[in-house]
Image (cartoon, grey):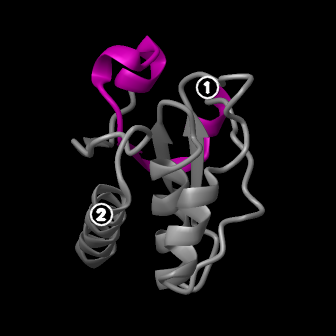
Amino acid sequence: MKDVLFICKSNINRSQQAEGFYNAFTSGSGAISAAIELDKDLQETSKTGIMLMLEKGIDISGKKSTLINKKMLEGVKKVVVICPKSFLPKYVLEFENIEFWNIKDPHYSGMDDRRAIRDEIEKRVRELIASN
């Protein structure tokens, strides 16, 4: 059983950062992350996202994009969605313990914005952990 599943559109940045923060802050592996869709050109973790997490002392370089599936929902207590609801398959929206974070996609952002996005994810993960 996992504590939380973080979902974003491509699983190359925001959801992987959230997973990295959660697992680092809880000294465990209670978080996983997944994509709504896999882009054949974007299946590697963002190099910039890796660098930004290394600035915080967390290495997510070994992560790969993983496509969401129904079975993943069976083994988690909470789902956190970091992309628009319109991207989600119906079965995700039907999950009972779901939370939505409105955090900008950093894909076309400059470094200052990417750091601000990373820091917002860190803040939200800390709040999530404190609320459990």
Image height of 77 relative to 57, above or below: above
Instruction: Find disc 1 in the rendering and name its residue.
Output: 70
Q: Nearer the viewer, residue 105 or 80?
A: 105
- Residue 29: horizontal and vertical position, in percent? 64, 71
Q: Quadrant of the N terminus?
A: bottom right
- Residue 132: horizontal and vertical position, in percent? 30, 71
Q: Amino acid at mark 1?
A: Lys
Q: CA distance from mark 2 to mark 1?
A: 36 Å
Q: Give the secondary structure at mark 2.
A: helix
Q: Which mark is residue 112?
A: 2
Residue at image position (58%, 69%) is 51
Residue at image position (74%, 47%) is 64
Q: Give the secondary structure at mark 1.
A: helix
- Residue 106: horizontal and vertical position, in percent? 38, 45
Which image quarter: residue 81? top left
Residue at image position (59%, 40%) is 34
Q: Which label lies toward us, 2 or 1? A: 2
Determine crowd level at label 1: few under 14, some 14-19, many 20+ residues with C-alpha closer than 10 A. few
- Residue 87: horizontal and vertical position, in percent? 40, 17
> So how many labels did they put on this image?
2
Q: Earlier in the sequence, mark 2 or mark 1?
A: 1
Let me know if residue 82 is in the magenta part.
yes
Q: Amino acid at mark 2?
A: Asp
Residue at image position (39%, 38%) is 108
Let me know if residue 36 is in the magenta part.
no
The reply to whether residue 7 is in sight is: yes
The reply to whether residue 1 is in sight is: no
Give left or right: position of 99 versus 30: left
Image height of 90 relative to 31, above or below: above
Give left or right: position of 66 versus 73: right
Region rendered in magenta: 69-93
